[in-house]
């Protein structure tokens, strides 16, 4: 069975799954009736990947579209082949948790056609790592308009928990992709503009590593602005000196009116509404932590009372500042950054209040938390649905809140050394976290003053600035890299024109040479995360529109010439988009360099 070893080698090379020949996982699997798998489990024979009319009907109804298909279970490869034969150029992600089944399939027949197919990703995972698999495939989900899930026949009987975890993982991943796309649609330009505006201030800002573990073993309270906040915020006043209070800018005026002083104020948003939230607090001696893309108008006012952390463009920022910044996880809510700061500073207990993650009382935020700047009621919204509540009763939520909640759940699971307690008076249930009243919890955990402000004054002391000329030099080098990359995509536009002309009848064009040269274009940016992260912020959202444009996507009824024309037009649009994005980035870099030189 030479094909067995070839299959195993190909699975490792193409899909990074290493199966040892002849391995024995203690499970007995055999093949019956041609190519039907049989697994012996608990004294029962469980058949899988057998003929199923539902699979045939599903495959028969697949139309040309830009979907992502998720198949739970590789089986013997029968179902895989049926789906692959029907989806055209769409993506198929196969989830498998049993190496014995994979090995049996690879020993039963030559699978090279499946394993070599560029449209398939085979992922070996279990119930605990499903979310990580979808994170590694996030680009496919981002560009897809829809996701279809197929369960390989018999897999529910083999491992129902795995199947259910996969289905739940698909829902979360696709919902997150929608939220991320919607965010980029609104603020992608603002994010980059803010980042380059902030670089001159990041050069002279305090080093965030100064606060690592400074509150080891203490208790932090993360104050969010959910509709229930006013129900228990007042309890913090008595304990202000015994806890680390961390909040976002929206709550500043309200907390001051209650006599509560936050120890950290976190800022992630680039929009000017942040300035409105903070303008009354610039002279109050507060300590701020900003992301690289925080609102520039606010950053300019903070001066020595600010620290920066990078959550989105870490590779780029460290490239120009000689590895000044520790990488924090990407965030979509200021509460996420507040939570990470609580853990980063070493707090043993992290309490949440105002973390509703739901439209409590049909409101977005608490009436006292900056709501005068926005419409706060949610009447007539059509994006809401009910989820399990913090105290049993179901509450109204939406995709954005679910995205925030799932981030917290994952972060809490990763940091099980920390005692997280949800003291929010209502809202959605957060998995993996205790629920307790705030007053009772504060009495139990917070008995001694921790001198937080004294500690922070030392941490926020002036330090030696990064050499601005070194930063300018690195920015100029990155500009040169982008100029070269841009020239390659400009060349790609010309190659696409040639491919188009050939398919329109100009036989003088060497089509093989044109296609071969075009296939090398993307290699110019491979591994350059510091550049690609900048380009992606501007390009990903419009790129999704291009790859989903029916006029530009090949389908099975197209003639070879029609396919060639669509290929050329689509890729010309993509190259033009990248060139346009790089032009904007170069413009921002030049402006940033001038500002740094002028300081």
Image (cartoon, grey):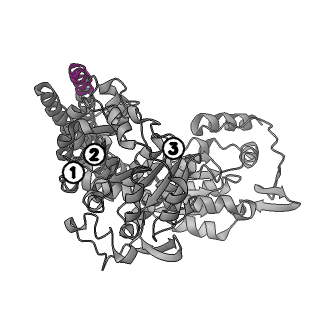
Quarter of the image holding residue 552? Answer: bottom left
| 453 up-or-down from 335: above or below | above
Quadrant location, the C terminus: top left
**The residue stretch that appears in magenta:** 466-481
Q: Position of residue 35 (x, y in %)?
A: 76, 55
Q: Outermost residue, bottom direction?
A: 380
Distance CA(mark 1)–CA(mark 3): 55 Å
Q: Sequence order check: which comes first, mark 3 or mark 2?
A: 3
The residue at the point 49 percent across, 41 percent down is 346
Check disc 2 and report its element: helix, strand or loop: loop
Residues marked 1 and 2 touching at CB (< 8 Å):
yes
Q: Sequence order check: which comes first, mark 1 or mark 2?
A: 1
Q: Sequence order check: which comes first, mark 1 or mark 3?
A: 3
Distance CA(mark 1)–CA(mark 2): 7 Å
Q: Nearer the viewer, residue 115 or 247?
A: 247
Asked whether, in this view, residue 411 is left or right of residue 107, the answer is: left
Check disc 3 and report its element: helix, strand or loop: loop
Category of crowding for the residue at label 2, using alpha-carbon neighbours closer than 10 angstroms: few (below 14), some (14–19), many (at least 20): some
Q: Nearer the viewer, residue 511 or 486?
A: 486
Quadrant location, the N terminus: top right
Dominant secondary structure of the magenta stretch? helix
Judging by the rendered image, the residue that carries numbered circle 3 is 118
Judging by the rendered image, the residue that carries numbered circle 2 is 286
Q: Position of residue 307 (x, y in %)?
A: 31, 37
């Amino acid at each position: 069975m030479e094909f067995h070893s070839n299959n195993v080698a190909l699975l490792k090379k193409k899909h990074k799954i290493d199966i040892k020949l002849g391995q024995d996982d203690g499970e007995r699997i055999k093949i019956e009736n041609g190519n039907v798998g049989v697994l012996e489990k608990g004294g029962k024979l469980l058949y899988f990947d057998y003929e199923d009319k539902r699979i045939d009907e599903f495959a028969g109804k697949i139309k040309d579209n830009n979907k992502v298909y998720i198949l739970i279970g590789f089986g013997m490869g029968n179902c895989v082949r049926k789906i692959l034969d029907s989806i055209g150029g769409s993506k198929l992600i196969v989830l498998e948790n049993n190496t014995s089944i994979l090995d049996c399939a690879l020993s039963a027949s030559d699978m090279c056609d499946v394993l070599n197919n560029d449209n398939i990703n085979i992922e070996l995972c279990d119930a605990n790592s499903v979310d990580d698999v979808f994170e590694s495939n996030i680009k496919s989900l981002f560009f897809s308009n829809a996701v279809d899930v197929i369960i390989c026949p018999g897999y529910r009987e083999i491992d129902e928990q795995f199947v259910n975890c996969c289905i739940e993982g698909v829902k979360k991943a696709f919902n997150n992709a929608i939220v991320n796309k919607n965010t980029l649609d609104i603020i992608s330009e603002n994010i980059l503009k803010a980042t380059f505006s902030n670089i001159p201030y990041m050069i002279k800002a305090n080093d965030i590593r100064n606060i690592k573990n400074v509150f080891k073993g203490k208790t932090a309270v993360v104050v969010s602005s959910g509709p229930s906040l006013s129900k228990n915020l007042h309890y913090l006043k008595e304990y202000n000196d015994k806890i680390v209070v961390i909040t976002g800018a929206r709550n500043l005026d309200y907390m001051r009116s209650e006599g509560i002083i936050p120890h950290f104020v976190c800022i992630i948003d680039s929009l000017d509404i942040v300035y409105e939230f903070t303008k009354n607090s610039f002279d109050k001696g507060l300590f701020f932590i900003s992301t690289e893309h925080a609102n520039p108008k606010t950053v300019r006012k903070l001066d020595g009372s600010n620290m920066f952390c990078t959550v989105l463009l870490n590779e780029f920022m460290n490239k120009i500042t000689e590895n000044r910044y520790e990488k924090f996880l990407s965030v979509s809510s200021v509460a996420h950054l507040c939570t990470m700061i609580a853990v980063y500073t070493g707090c043993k207990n992290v309490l949440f209040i105002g973390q509703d993650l739901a439209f409590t009382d049909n409101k977005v935020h608490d009436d006292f938390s900056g709501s005068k700047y926005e419409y706060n009621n949610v009447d007539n919204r059509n994006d809401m649905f009910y989820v399990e509540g913090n105290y049993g009763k179901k509450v109204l939520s939406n995709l954005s809140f679910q995205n925030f909640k799932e981030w917290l759940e994952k972060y809490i699971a990763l940091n099980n050394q920390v005692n997280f307690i949800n003291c929010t008076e209502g809202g959605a249930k957060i998995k993996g976290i205790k629920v307790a009243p705030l007053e009772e919890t504060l009495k139990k955990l917070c008995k001694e003053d921790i001198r937080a402000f004294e500690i922070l004054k030392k941490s926020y002391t002036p330090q030696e600035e990064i050499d601005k000329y070194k930063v300018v030099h690195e920015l100029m080098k990155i500009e040169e890299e982008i100029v070269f990359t841009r020239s390659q995509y400009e060349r790609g536009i010309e190659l696409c024109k040639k491919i188009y002309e050939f398919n329109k009848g100009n036989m003088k064009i060497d089509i093989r040479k044109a296609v071969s040269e075009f296939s090398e274009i993307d290699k110019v940016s491979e591994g350059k995360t510091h550049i690609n992260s900048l380009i992606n912020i501007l390009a990903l959202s419009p790129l999704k529109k291009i790859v989903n444009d029916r006029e530009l996507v090949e389908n099975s009824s197209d003639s070879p010439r029609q396919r060639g024309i669509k290929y050329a037009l689509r890729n010309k649009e993509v190259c033009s988009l990248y060139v346009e994005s790089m032009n904007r980035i170069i413009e921002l870099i030049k402006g940033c360099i001038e500002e740094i030189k002028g300081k």
